[in-house]
Image: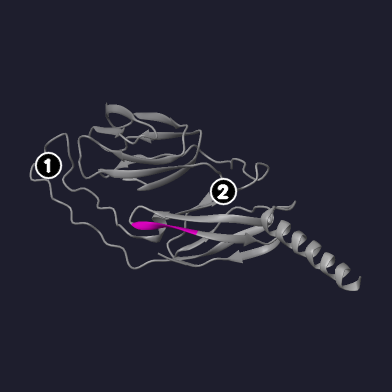
Amino acid sequence: MRTRNASRHFAACAVVALAATACPVDGFAGVVRGEVRMAAGTTPATAVNAYPGRASSMPTAKAMTHGIATDAVLWLERVPARADTARGGARPKLAQKDQCFMPRVLPVAVGTSVDFPNLDPIFHNVFSASPTKRFDLGKYPRGQSKRVVFDKPGLENVYCDIHSGMEAFVLVLPTHVFTMPDAAGRYALPEVPGGGYTLHLWHPDRPEMRREVVVPATGDLVVDLDS
């Protein structure tokens, strides 16, 4: 009888432990933070415009560095609805400046409106042929801005049909719990209830990574990633 009761007690404890791992608990005290470690970035060579008087291009175009930590996006999958709420702040922008899209990578949650202002003294175009959302905003001059609502999750490759070297990425996520690292690779995701999640790391120049994590009910979970 004692052995049977002990077995029942062990089974009950195992169920409780599994539930604590798989199911988030109340409270918003758990934070996933860490560092994304990458090799030094590379800057593609840029061609100097031989005809700087042309209205369609600038004398020199800014070259966007590739492979840097600040282009990474991290987010959590399986966030409970009560924790997956929009954060305040200005509407996101993907500007056309110095004959580049800035920023190169823009993560947004599904349903977000993004502004595309032209800050250059030349015409630009913004379009995407990605199946997530196909659009073409046409050509427009400095001082004008157009807007797109991204209503499906997925990756948007954004281009300018005037300047072939211009490229950006809008990563439309099914959650508001995402972040980007700073220049040193450090990141911290918004607080979530304790429980089991999938941590995603996406970068335009690196393979995507996934890591199963268990966020504590209180305190931090440190997850360092080499990409």
Q: Residues within 10 Å of mark 2 (few under 14, many from 20)?
A: many
Q: Residue 62, percent across and down? A: 25, 50
Tell me which corner region of the image, top left, top right, bottom left or bottom right, holds residue 87. Answer: top right
Extreme residue in the right direction: 1
Q: How is the image coloured?
A: one colour
Extreme residue in the bottom direction: 3
Q: Check disc 1 and give the amino acid type.
A: Pro
Which comes sooner in the sequence, label 1 or label 2?
1
Residue 20 falls left or right of residue 58: right
| Image quadrant in which the N terminus is located | bottom right
Residue 175 numbered mark, or none: none
Highlighted magenta segment, given as a residue range: 206-210
Question: Looking at the image, is 121 positioned above or below residue 14?
Answer: above
Quickly name the residue at label 2: 177
Residue nearer the viewer, 175 or 94: 175
Q: Which residue is rendered at x = 56% and y = 48% of the image?
A: 177
* Residue 200 on the magenta segment: no
Q: Residue 45, percent across and down? A: 18, 56
Asked whether disc 1 touches disc 2, contact meaning CB atoms under 8 Å apart, the reply is: no
Q: Residue 122, percent across and down? A: 22, 35
Q: Which residue is rendered at x = 55% and y = 41% of the image?
A: 89
Quickly name the residue at label 1: 52
Q: Residues within 10 Å of mark 1 (few under 14, many from 20)?
A: few
Q: Which residue is rendered at x = 12% and y = 42% of the image?
A: 52
Question: Looking at the image, is 67 positioned above or below residue 167?
Answer: below
Q: Which residue is rendered at x = 25% and y = 59% of the image?
A: 43
